[in-house]
Image (spheres, rainbow, N blue to C red):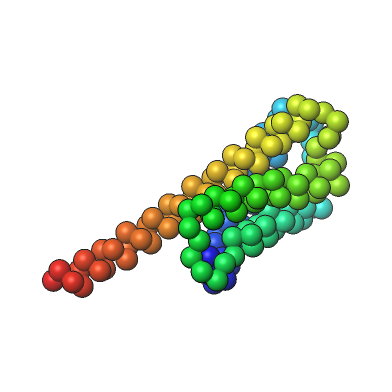
Amino acid sequence: MRIGDLVKTMVHSYFVITTGIIASMYVFCLIFNRNAVYSLDDIGRILLMALASDLPFIIFYSRKELGKKQMLIRQIIHIPFLLAVLFYFAQLWDWVRMNSPTEVIVFIALVLVVYAAVLAIATFQDKKLADKLNDRLKQRYHS
């Protein structure tokens, strides 16, 4: 993925990730801490967590087009790296108790749901762009 495309993807995904984190925090607190109260610091941490979630996309940077196998390998590297970054911040801010297997499992599940949402939206946007380009090519060469 070229740097321009990567930055564009990262900007788009940042807002999806932020929304996903807010929804995930709601579900997580609904399960584990119904009396949670969020402060202004917490809002800043949510935005920082979204940025920290977005930066590992750099793993997908390449000067040439990546094949399916190369992309799969990078995704296999990306997911554990992303989880490590997110666990670091979640533990730093006392969002997840690492000695609670249930909290850890729910946290991983929520991260994977947000990851899938970001991937689905990016795939949808790519397909939409490809369809638009194909339509223009058809109009140009078949008219």
Across and down, in percent, residue 133 comes to: 32, 66
82 vs 3: above or below: above
Q: Residue at x 44, y 56 (%)?
A: 125
Residue 110 in sight here: yes
23 vs 48: above or below: above
Across and down, in percent, residue 27 comes to: 67, 34
- Tally the numbered discs: 0
102 vs 52: above or below: above
Q: Residue at x 82, y 28 (%)?
A: 100
**Left-right relation of 39 to 135:** right
Image quarter where the C terminus lies is: bottom left
Query: Which of 53/40 is in front?
Result: 53
Query: Which of 83/14 is in front?
Result: 83
Residue reaching furthest left?
143
Which of the 4 image quarters holds residue 141?
A: bottom left
Q: Residue at x 37, y 57 (%)?
A: 128
Residue 50 in sight here: no
**Left-right relation of 21 to 131:** right
Q: Residue at x 71, y 50 (%)?
A: 81
